[in-house]
Amino acid sequence: MSTGRRLLVETDGASRGNPGFAGVGVIIKDETGKTLETIGKFLGISTNNQAEYQALITALEAVQRYAPEAVTVHSDSELMVKQINGQYRVRHPEIIPLFQQAIELATALPSFTIIHVPREKNPGADRVANVAIDSRGRRVALD
C-alpha cells in the first residue's frame, strides 16, 4: 500500500435492543474522498456504546495497512468522541478496556483526530453497520 496518505474514516456501531444484536460499519476513504475499503462486522449481543468502540477499534486496526500520515475519524457517537478526546471520563467497566485499546491504536498513528458528526452526516457507516447486523455473521454484498 502507498504511504503518505491522509485518510478519512467514517465509523458507526449499532445495537438493536441495547443490548441486542450489534454490528459495526467502517468506511475508509483517501484524501480525495475515494472509498478504499468498507468493513461490516457482526458482533453478536452488545450495547450501542460497546459497538461504537468496536467500530473505532476495527477502523484503527484497518488503517494501519495504508501506512497513513494522518487519520481523521468521523463518528456520530458524541459520548465516545468526547471520551477519546479526554472531555469525558470513562467509567463503565465494560467500556474501559475498549477505550484503552482504542487509545493505544490511535497513539500508534502519526496523526489522529476524531470528530463528532451528526447521525445524518454519517449514513454510509450506519448502513454498513445495519447490514452487518442483518447478516448475523454471513458474508453479504455491501453494495
Image (tube, rainbow, N blue to C red):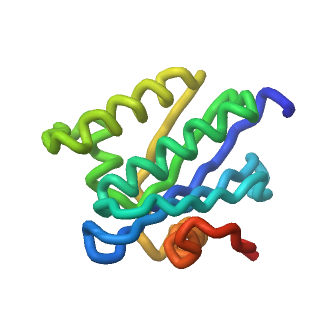
Left-right relation of 6 to 92: right
Left-right relation of 85 to 102: left
**Can you give x and y, in whole percent of width and height, for residue 59 in the image?**
57, 45
* Residue at left offset 28%, top offset 45%: 82
Between 32 and 95, the one lying in front of the other is 95
Left-right relation of 45 to 94: right
Between 110 and 97, the one lying in front of the other is 97
As drawn, the residue found furthest toward the left would be 91
Q: The C terminus appears in which quarter of the rendering?
A: bottom right
**Can you give x and y, in whole percent of width and height, for residue 79 in the image?**
26, 53
Q: Can you say whether 91 is above or below 23 in the image?
A: above
Quadrant position of residue 84:
top left
Asked whether residue 10 appears in the rendered view, the answer is: yes
**Can you give x and y, in whole percent of width and height, for residue 75 in the image?**
45, 56
Quadrant position of residue 51:
bottom left
**Can you give x and y, in whole percent of width and height, for residue 141 in the image?**
74, 73
* Residue at left offset 49%, top offset 38%: 113
* Residue at left offset 68%, top offset 27%: 69
